[in-house]
């Protein structure tokens, strides 16, 4: 994509929109085109980054002014001056973070067999962030902000771009991606901490030493950084060894990358679903399914249990490599809580596993789930069932057998 001004003419705008579409829908084909384009750090900033990085900032600004922030019946709407000042600072921090992330990409590449090239590293940092920036549109309506999780697709964009842009061998791409992702998370937290230093607000506070408190009842324990890095390195090695073990059987696959982790067989997961649950729940049906997105495979085994009007659905979901990325929150001691008169939700580490619990007292419905071995989600969702019954359903599954399958 030659140097251009996106707002200059229709051809430039079409090229810009084509880049957005292709990097999201056809990343494996788009990365070689990006790699071959003549560019400078300045041209990538002026032609792409300054526009796409503005999306989450502008949407957050508009959403805060129109809807404000609210929880548990308490609302807060910032003044225009305060919201605008915050947006400008956040925008500047995002633009700076891209460049710093590119420096990290460039510096670590040789350690994983890649090549150092500042412009290529910046291309990887800038274009892989597209999904996370576009997911920022959901902050326009605070009630939809949970959908910003779709920005995790940027992890896959980063992974697919690593072999092309910085020439890290495919068999080491996951280990390299995992390492720079850890650094990227730290940079994000640092940016959040810096913004609160300059602009203290009632919705975010904290410091990098100890626990960092973020909006929505989310806390992150920065003292666990070293432990998190070591665990991520261990997972990266495990993923890399798994990929090497299957690569010899994939010579006929062509140019498509093989899965980083071999999925657990559906029948193996199905066999772990008990025929009945404690407290008199009986199983009515069992099913399995497989699927995937963005090069990641998912396997699910599910059973329905009933007791009169009560219903519990127990699911075992093999998250594969996505589980390794999802586990990052647990490594940093991340937790989140929310409670109203009729509903509560909480997420955090329980007995060393990421645990999610939600319950609506008014509708008597909720769910309880744990992530086993940073890979398999054991989830009980019920209607008419108590929280204790949902927890008993999860505890009825043989966790030891899941841990053995996940290795």
Image (cartoon, rainbow, N blue to C red):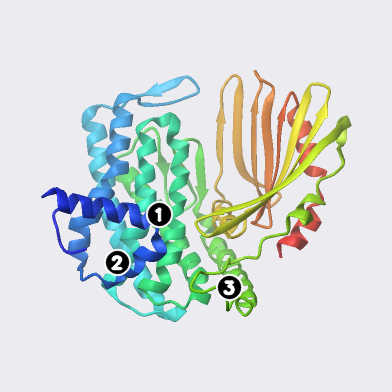
Q: Which is nearer the N-term, disc 3 or disc 2?
A: 2
Q: Which residue is drawn at 62% across and 65% down?
A: 261
Q: Which is nearer the N-term, disc 3 or disc 1?
A: 1
Q: Is 84 left, or right, of 391 in this rendering?
A: left
Does the rendering let one see residue 224?
yes
Q: Mark 2 points at which residue?
A: 34
Q: Is 329 left, or right, of 106 in this rendering?
A: right
Does the rendering let one see residue 317?
no
Counting labels gives: 3
- Kindly report which numbered mark, 3 or 2, lies closer to the viewer in this rendering: 2
Q: Residues within 10 Å of mark 1 (few under 14, many from 20)?
A: few
Q: Is mark 3 on a helix, strand or loop?
A: helix
Q: Name the residue under label 3.
A: 240
* Front residue (pair 225, 32): 32
* Front residue (pair 26, 224): 26
Q: Quadrant of residue 251?
A: bottom right
Q: Residues within 10 Å of mark 2 (few under 14, many from 20)?
A: many
Q: Is mark 1 on a helix, strand or loop?
A: helix
Q: Quadrant of residue 69?
A: top left
Q: How crowded is mark 3: few (under 14 residues within 10 Å), some or many (20 or more)?
A: many
Rendered view: 155 above or below 7:
below
Residue 396, image x, y percentages: 83, 43
Label annotation for residue 25:
1
Disc 1 from disc 2: Cα separation:
14 Å
Q: Residue at x 75, y 44 (%)?
A: 287
Rendered view: 71 above or below 248:
above
């Amino acid at each position: 994509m030659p140097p251009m001004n996106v707002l200059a003419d229709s051809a430039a705008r079409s090229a810009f929109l084509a880049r957005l579409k292709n990097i999201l829908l056809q990343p494996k084909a788009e990365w070689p085109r990006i790699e071959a384009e003549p560019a400078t750090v300045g041209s990538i900033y002026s032609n792409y980054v300054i526009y796409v990085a503005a999306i989450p900032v502008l949407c957050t600004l508009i959403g805060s002014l129109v809807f404000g922030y609210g929880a548990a019946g308490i609302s807060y709407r910032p003044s225009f001056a305060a919201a605008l000042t915050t947006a400008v600072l956040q925008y500047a921090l995002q633009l700076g973070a891209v460049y710093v992330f590119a420096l990290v990409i460039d510096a670590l590449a040789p350690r994983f067999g890649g090549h150092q090239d500042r412009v290529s590293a910046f291309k990887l940092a800038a274009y892989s962030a597209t999904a996370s920036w576009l997911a920022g549109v959901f902050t326009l309506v605070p009630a939809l902000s949970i959908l910003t999780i779709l920005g995790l697709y940027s992890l896959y964009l980063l992974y697919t771009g690593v072999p092309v842009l910085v020439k890290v061998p495919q068999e080491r791409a996951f280990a390299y991606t995992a390492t720079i992702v850890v650094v990227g998370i730290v940079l994000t937290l640092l940016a959040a901490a810096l913004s609160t230093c300059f602009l203290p607000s009632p919705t975010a506070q904290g410091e990098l030493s100890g626990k960092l408190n973020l909006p929505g009842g989310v806390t992150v324990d920065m003292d666990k950084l070293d432990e998190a890095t070591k665990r991520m390195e261990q997972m990266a090695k495990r993923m890399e060894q798994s990929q090497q073990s299957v690569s010899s059987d994939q010579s006929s696959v062509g140019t498509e990358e093989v899965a980083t982790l071999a999925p657990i067989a559906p029948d193996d997961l199905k066999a772990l679903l008990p025929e009945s649950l404690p407290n008199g729940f009986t199983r009515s049906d069992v099913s399995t399914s497989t699927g995937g997105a963005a090069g990641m495979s998912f396997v699910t085994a599910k059973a329905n249990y009933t007791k009169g009007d009560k219903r519990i659905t127990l699911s075992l979901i093999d998250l594969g490599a996505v589980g390794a990325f999802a586990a990052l929150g647990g490594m940093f001691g991340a937790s989140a809580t929310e409670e109203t008169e009729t509903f509560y939700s909480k997420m955090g580490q329980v007995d060393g596993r990421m645990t999610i619990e939600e319950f609506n007292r008014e509708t008597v419905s909720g769910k309880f789930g744990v992530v086993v071995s940073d890979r398999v989600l054991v989830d009980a969702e019920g209607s008419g069932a108590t929280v204790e019954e949902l927890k008993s359903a999860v505890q009825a599954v043989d966790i030891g057998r899941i841990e053995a399958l996940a290795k």
